[in-house]
Amino acid sequence: LKKRFKSYGQGARPVKSMAVLGAGIMGGGIAYTSALRGTPVRLKDIAPPPLALGMKEASRQLARQVKTGRIDQAKADAVLATIHPQLDDAGFGEVDLVIEAVVENLSVKHQVLSALEGAVRPDTVIASNTSSLRIDDIARPLARPENFVGMHFFNPVPVMALVEVVRGERTSDAAVSTAVAHAVRMGKTPVVVKDCPGFLVNRLITPYVSGFLQLLADGADFAEVDRVMEAFGWPMGPALLQDVVGMDTGGHVGDVIAAGYPQRMRPVTRNAVKLMVEHRRYGQKSGAGFYRHG
Ligand code: NAD
């Protein structure tokens, strides 16, 4: 890896401590994995219940590490103590990197990141874990777009190796290098990709999910499709994938990619995912999606 990413090692800013915005499915996993690999994390959310969920997930992951003998209880306790849950920006002036993992909504990200710029140092690198929005679109209101970069993790973060590092038009080499170096430190495999709706992986996955939703509209049974794709050799079928991703997030990603490639994808107003969002069946995170969970 060091050899492959040598050119990005240049100018990486040291990340002694960091912050994660959003303690949901992704933010909780990013905070846990960074802390496990030695970076203290300030984990921020807007309300106590999601913050508590993020911390609970970190404890669960650490308990699993202890159970499988990878670390002992003392190490697990020490790692957990380096994840600091908070509802405000306390200590943000000291962090070297912030990874934003709030909802996939452009105006929410604009608000959150503009406010963040006022709370961090001028040299702090700010990364977005967006799965589909263009980095240049998110960067529009920012005063320091050179410090802004995409760091697209995959779900579940502790398990999935790939991180798409997205270079926007105004992203500096130092910001790209810092993101690559931090991904490597987390034990991940970073790949630097161009800035476009859906980047690389979601441009491949979205047409697949869209094909699945068309199969359902044609009368297919979702559980049968899942069984077929598992027998085909994929780790999970498309229905369970949507449950794991979260129906709301998956729906936003589909919309962003359809809007980004209007000649290739038709915008969809009604499909199984949209229906489930209307009924608040978000998948694993709400206890039910295509399947019941928990
Ligand atoms: P989620 O709904 O599980 O979590 C989002 C969290 O952000 C919630 O806890 C919410 O309370 C919090 N939040 C909202 N506004 C906030 C603010 N102003 N400050 C701090 N926290 C705030 O969503 P998620 O699935 O973790 O997705 C987060 C981001 O990661 C999105 O951009 C999404 O596209 C991206 N992503 C998701 C997946 C996935 O599989 N779910 C994969 C890759 C990337």
Image (cartoon, rainbow, N blue to C red):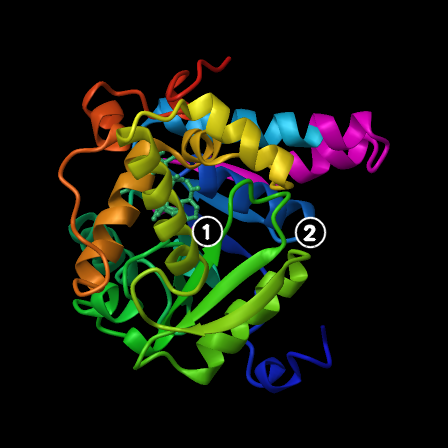
What residue occupies the far front of the structure in this picture?
218
Q: Position of residue 135 (x, y in %)?
A: 30, 67
- Is 177 placed above or below 218 here? below
In the image, what residue occupies the spot 48% across and 45% down? 42
| Image region (quadrant) for ligand 1 | top left
> Is the C-beta of the residue carrying label 1 under 8 Å from the nearest atom of ligand 1?
no
Write down the region rendered in magenta.
63-91
- The stretch drawn in magenta includes residue 2: no
| Ligand 1 neighbours mark 2 (CB distance < 8 Å) | no
The answer to whether residue 19 is above or below residue 284 is below
Residue at screen point 40% across, 55% down: 202
Quadrant of residue 199 within the rendered picture = bottom left
How dense is the environment of label 2, judged by Cα within 10 Å: few (below 14), some, or many (20 and up)? few
Q: Residue at x 43, y 30 (%)?
A: 239
Image mark for residue 19:
1
Left or right of residue 89, residue 239 in this image: right
Q: Secondary structure at mark 1?
A: strand
Q: Which corner quadrant of the image does residue 283 belong to? A: top left
Secondary element at image label 2: loop
Q: Name the mark nearer the viewer: 1 or 2.
A: 2
Q: Amino acid at mark 2?
A: Arg
Examine the rendered structure and indicate whether residue 212 appears above or below residue 41: above
Q: Is residue 11 above or below residue 92?
A: below
Neighbourhood count class around disc 1 (C-alpha, 10 Å): few under 14, some 14–19, many 20 upward: many
Which quarter shows the N terminus? bottom right
Farthest residue, direction left:
269
Q: Residue 12 location in percent, x, y?
A: 56, 78
